[in-house]
Image (spheres, rainbow, N blue to C red):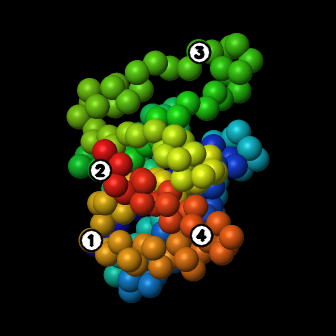
Amino acid sequence: MTKNIMIVGVGGQGSLLASKLLGHLLLKEGYDVKVSEVHGMSQRGGSVVTYVRFGERVYSPIIDKGQADFIVSFEKLEAARYVEYLKEDGRIVVNTQEIDPMPVITGAAAYPENLIEKMQDKDIQVDAMDCLALANEAGSSKAVNIVLMGRLSRYFDIPVEKWQEAIRECVPAKFLDLNMKAFELGRESE
């Protein structure tokens, strides 16, 4: 059975590394894996989406509406934007950070309020946490992606050591300690 993960965020947040890490881990676990390219405005500030699909045999990298087992979101508004892709029993893992899109920056719109609560009110399973604070605690605001991967790892039957091994293989050595700490904080944080 194929499992589907959508990684959604804003350009420049590290969704490429997150999808590379996931793809690497799942391949090593023996799955057929398809990772889509990043879709969207990948320059800093634009909305970006990456699909990671894995299973015994995966034919397409694309995830349709109502098919995502997980949505991993770097930002609340992006989670809300893609919620219709979530399966009925799917889960959203979301960073509670707010990054103002252009209409908010220009004053043409206000940032929507209570997005997490609105999703929960629709009986959506939402695992929300301040990944930016945890990334900063690990040593860099740029580690939000690895904090999110740490959180996502809680929902998989893959030993934590395998996730850590994938981080070692995908992250430059000079950033390894920081990313290991970010992963641990994401996984262990309550």
Residue 110's tag is: 3
Task: Depth check: give the residue in front, 98 or 82.
Answer: 98
- 74 vs 120, left or right, is right
Labels 3 and 2: the sequence-earlier one: 2
Which percent across, then down, holds residue 143? 58, 54
The residue where tag 4 is placed is 176
> Which mark is in front, 1 or 2?
1
Q: CA distance from mark 2 to mark 4?
A: 31 Å
Q: Amino acid at mark 3?
A: Ala
SS assignment at label 2: strand
SS assignment at label 3: loop
Q: CA distance from mark 1 to mark 2?
A: 16 Å
Task: Depth check: give the residue in front, 23 or 82.
Answer: 23
Q: In the picture shown, does residue 23 fall above or below 152?
A: below
Residue lying at 53% horizontally and 34% vertically, measured from the top left:
97
Which percent across, then down, holds residue 12? 70, 49
Which percent across, then down, holds residue 124? 28, 38
